[in-house]
Structure formats: structure tokens, C-alpha cells
Image (cartoon, helix red, strand yellow):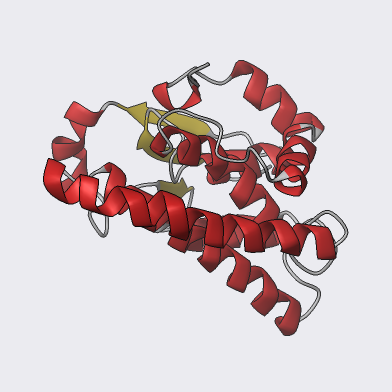
Amino acid sequence: MAPKTKLTYFNGTGLGESIRFLLVYLGREYEDSRFEEEEWAKIKPTTPWGKVPLLEVEGEKPVAWSLAITRYLGREAGLAGANTWEDLRIDEIVYVINDLRSSMASYFHEENEAMKEYLKGPLFNTTVPFYLSRLERHVKENNGFLANGKLSWADVYFAALSDYLNWMNGSKEILVGYPNLQALKAKIFSLPKIKDYVEKRPITIELQLKE
């Protein structure tokens, strides 16, 4: 019997969704503990690093760092590389995707309107196309996947994060014009266990695209 597992994260996709995707891909039963923004101040001091997502596995100390958790579950799911070089290729892609997310988040959460306007042009005219065009090429050159010519946890990470990227893109589909990335996302979303989860997951604000 698998140990009891609990994931604590905001009631949204964000950095928690790739972990949810991998847990359901593994067929691992888990408690999906979601909380609202206003509850974070109370929860934050209870986490090891003042961060979520927080993964708790029965018999182990809690872990709270999104990429570390995602990488661990990717290995558990058999979606890591066949050797250290393949792992390096996967890590490269994941860190690139995370750089894109971080760049968009810096803009999206900027509270100074003048600074936000200053950041907007370079982000959407240069940074986002720079990353997405290169990720698009990687998929084209890797048999429809992001690394090593086969399914890896990098693909799951990207697909799960894409809805959050859409939200930070003004609730508009960010993958328009990138057919290989669109096909990759569709491929991940069609994996039976992930498909079942997606059909039943809460419709949070990140999932509500504008026409």
C-alpha cells in the first residue's frame, strides 16, 4: 500500500499543477489540500521554507520546493532520463520553462503601474517569443517532445504550467502560433489519468480564458 500523501497549495494551478498531474499519472491517491489567498499568512509559517507547494508523505519530513517535488515524482513515474546526460537535457528544458514563468510572474505581480507598463513591451515582444520559439523547435526536433525524443516529466511540467502562463498572458491562449507546443499540450492532456483529472478539477481563475 502506498503511503498517505498530501499536497498543500493555493486553490489554483500555478506551481502545484504539475505535481497534481504527476500524482494522478502515477495513480497515487492523495489529499489535494487547497487554500485561498487570504489564508496564506496563517499557513506560511507552518511550512519548512515559507513556500508552497508542500508535499507530505507518510513517514517522511514535508518537502516544499516545486521543482524538487516535480523532479522526484517524475523519477517515480519513470519519466526521468535513461542516464545522467538525458537528465541534464530534461533539467535544461525545465529551467528554461521556469525562467519564462518567472519573467512573466515578475510582470504580472508588479504593483507599480508605471513599472508594469515599462516591463510589458520587452516581455511580450521579446522574452516570451524568444522562449516559446525555441521550445517549439525543441518539440519539432525531439519526436514531438521537449527532450530526448520521448515523454519526460519536462513535458508534463510544461503542459501543466501552460494554463498559468495563459492567465499571466491576459487570460489568452499563449501557444497561438506554436503548433508543436499546442500538440504537445494536447498529448499530455489526453493521457487517460490526466484527462480524467482535468475533466474533474475545479475551474479556477487561471482556467477561464477570454474569447
Height in image: 147 above or below 202? Answer: below
Height in image: 12 above or below 84? Answer: above
Q: Quadrant of residue 194?
A: top right
Residue 200, position in %: x, y? 61, 17
Height in image: 66 above or below 82? Answer: above
Q: Is residue 78 left or right of residue 100?
A: right
Residue 109, position in %: x, y? 24, 43
Residue 23, position in %: x, y? 62, 42
Q: Looking at the image, can residue 152 be seen? A: no
Say which of 141 and 159 sits in front: 141
Q: Quadrant of the N terminus?
A: top right
Residue drawn at x 79%, y 32% as measured from the top left: 190
Q: Residue furthest right?
A: 143
Q: Looking at the image, can residue 142 be seen? A: yes
Residue drawn at x 56%, y 41% as measured from the top left: 162
Q: Quadrant of residue 112?
A: top left
Residue drawn at x 79%, y 35% as measured from the top left: 191
Residue 148, position in %: x, y? 80, 69
Q: Quadrant of residue 83?
A: bottom right
Residue drawn at x 66%, y 48% as measured from the top left: 156
Question: Disc count in the image?
Answer: 0
Height in image: 116 above or below 86? Answer: above
Say which of 137 and 36 sits in front: 137
Say which of 89 and 25 sits in front: 89
